[in-house]
Image (cartoon, rainbow, N blue to C red):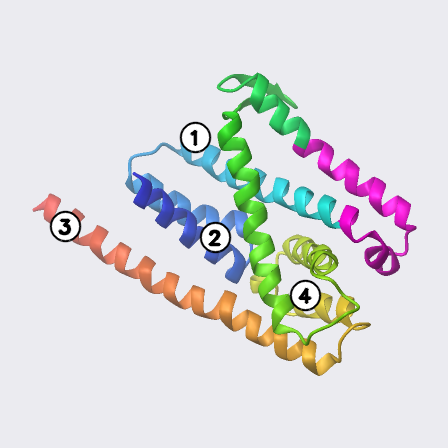
Amino acid sequence: SFPRVFFASLIASIFSYAVGLALVTGGAVRYRIYSDAGLKTGEIAKIIAFGFSTFTLCLFLISGITMLIAPDTLAGLIFLPSATVQIIGVLLLVPIAAYLITSLLHAGEDIKVFGYEVHIPSFAISLSQILMSGGEVVLTGSVLYFLLPASTELSLPAFLGLYIITQVVTFAAQIPGGVGVFDAMVLLLLGNFFAPEAVFAAVLAFRILFYVIPLAVSSLALLIYESRWRGRRAAMVQ
């Protein structure tokens, strides 16, 4: 049902962000909730893979767009010419276009990708997948941007490009909560635009809003879910 899917996705996403090791923590939460609903391991694995592919497409989308919109700012930080940054931006958007075209032409079909059979969703689902995941990153990145002091040197699109870099590095590090990695990357990338103490204060507030509070609420929600599940199981045994 939609409430169960929404609950599982929300809790899994929060644990993935706040705890780290996304495939392990988020995957474990999804497996726990979906297995209770009767889904088989293979079906749950497909759901987890769909979520991971959504995250990857989101990174490509936002990175590509920001490189096209604000190449000059990003070029100075990654030490590449602006034209090269824009070319990279276009190349990052190619997989997005290919995915949408494939879903338009082969919706509902199973195709082979690197030896694996992949089910192609409809164009509407594919488009929603990309727009919603991209919107999530834009929203969270915008919150951090507006927690920082006002700046005429760093536009929101350029900042989102930097924010994506921090997300990629944090994900690759696979450290719980990205502690130290996310903070250091933000300080490093924004050091030319803001005072260190202003960046630190913004990151601290951001962590409270998007890590501490959501993790506390989701942990409580998962605890309530587990207690109810155990109660239902005990009633069935009796």
Residue at numbered disc 2: 13
Q: Find disc 4 in the rendering and name its residue.
A: 181
Q: Which residue corresponds to mark 3?
A: 234
The secondary structure type at the circle numbered 3 is helix
Q: Which residues are magenta?
A: 67-96
Determine whether the residue tagged by mark 1 lies in a helix, strand or loop. helix
Which amino acid does the dot numbered 3 rest on? Ala
Q: Which one is in front, 108 or 28?
A: 108
Q: Earlier in the sequence, mark 1 or mark 3?
A: 1
Mark 2 vs mark 4, foreground winner is 2
Q: CA distance from mark 2 to mark 1?
A: 20 Å
x, y percent for residue 196: 74, 79
Tag 4, which secondary structure?
Answer: helix
- Circle 1 is placed at which residue position? 42
Point out the tag, 2 or 4, that comes first from the N-terminus.
2
| Type of the residue with mark 4 | Val
Q: Is 195 located above or below residue 105 in the figure? A: below
x and y percent of residue 84 in the render?
89, 44
Q: Nearer the viewer, residue 74 or 216?
A: 74
| Residue 83 on the magenta segment | yes
